[in-house]
Image (tube, rainbow, N blue to C red):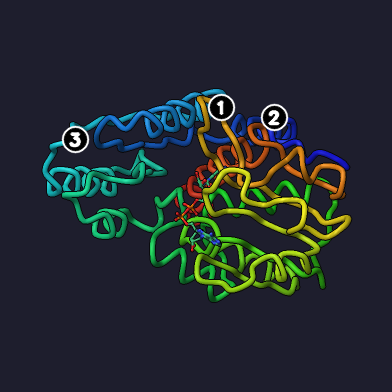
Amino acid sequence: MMLLEGLKVSKILNEELKKKVEQLKRKPRLEIILVGDDPASLIYVNSKVKTQSELGMVANLNHFKENSDEDEIYEFIQKLNNDDSVDGILLQLPVPKHMNQERLMDAISYKKDVDGFHTMNQGLLFQKREGIRPATPKGIMMLLDYYGIDVQSKHVVIIGRSQIVGAPLSKMFLDKNATVTITHSKTKDLPSITKQADILVAALGKPKFVTYDMVKDGAIVIDVGINRVDGKLTGDVDFEAVKDKVSYITPVPKGVGPMTICALGYNLYELYLNRNEREK
Ligand code: NAD
């Protein structure tokens, strides 16, 4: 078994990005919006701010109170849309329940949509056109690419069909000529499907869900899950149980997580280029 070391690869790719950023006329600028005090969200946004700064880019955190008005956030987004010095806008999800999340996500100009969640960017992906891709699927593809893993003609089975991971990832694999099966909570006899996978992606959010009997000998396993169990980060795959059966596997932590943040940096760079250098 070989580890797909997301942390190590992200450091290498971040170094490459840093050099590209140094060549730009000004530092790309990301504005992050966090509403409320969800502890996990706070950890995520702080890590995004730290990484973008290390890459030589600017990342500002705009922290709003939990009981803020939806229109206040909407108007703030409009202000950022109209500010030429802002290249990327990130609305940390989820927003508080009293807000219409989709309305706020669509308020972000797709030309500044660093997460690639805007309907326009999702549409571009599903039409196989250039656009900003969601960071987690993009990070997974970058990781496989780094290790020289060719996905063409492979059977990829994805557990989970969310708009941020499973659904866009399935399209990205399809566009690389893989044969893709998407499974979800209503799928019958899941193990009979996962056992066929040359590449198995677990993105469902249930700790140690994927067990020995669910994987094929020599499979490549990508564990997207981030679950906190007894204060410890645990993936969706029972790593210890499957590690000697598979050919490659991502660890949790230090696997897909750092690749997601790395892909976010590449998205910000891309947005900067699109608006500042390619269009002029
Ligand atoms: P989600 O809750 O939006 O979607 C979960 C999906 O899993 C759904 O499509 C559901 O149908 C499916 N599912 C649930 N139970 C199932 C079951 N028993 N069998 C088969 N399918 C089942 O989750 P999400 O936002 O896609 O996140 C999934 C996991 O990935 C979470 O642990 C999340 O924390 C993690 N995550 C990690 C990163 C990262 O950077 N590493 C990024 C995003 C999400």
Which of pointers 3 and 1 lies earlier in the amino acid sequence? 3
Secondary structure beneath dot 1 equals strand
Counting from the top left corner in percent of width and height, residue 39 is at 36, 28
Asked whether mark 2 lies closer than 8 Å to ligand 1, one says no
**Residue 248 as seen in the image, left or right of residue 180:** right
Determine which residue is flagged by label 1: 232
Which of pointers 2 and 1 lies earlier in the amino acid sequence? 2
Asked whether mark 3 lies closer than 8 Å to ligand 1, one says no
Judge depth for marks 2 and 3 and give the one in front.
Answer: 3
Quadrant for the N terminus, please.
top right
The CA span between labels 3 and 1 is 27 Å
Q: Amino acid at mark 3?
A: Glu
- Give me the disc on residue 154: none
Determine which residue is flagged by label 3: 66
Q: Amino acid at mark 2?
A: Lys
**Residue 179 position (above or below residue 34):** below
State the residue at coordinates (54%, 76%).
Answer: 127
The CA span between labels 2 and 3 is 34 Å
State the residue at coordinates (63%, 30%).
Answer: 18
**Residue 44 position (above or below residue 130):** above
State the residue at coordinates (60%, 61%).
Answer: 159
Q: Nearer the viewer, residue 51 or 224?
A: 224
Determine which residue is flagged by label 2: 11
Tags 2 and 1 touching, CB below 8 Å = no
Query: Label 1: few (<14), some or many (≥20) within 10 Å?
Result: few
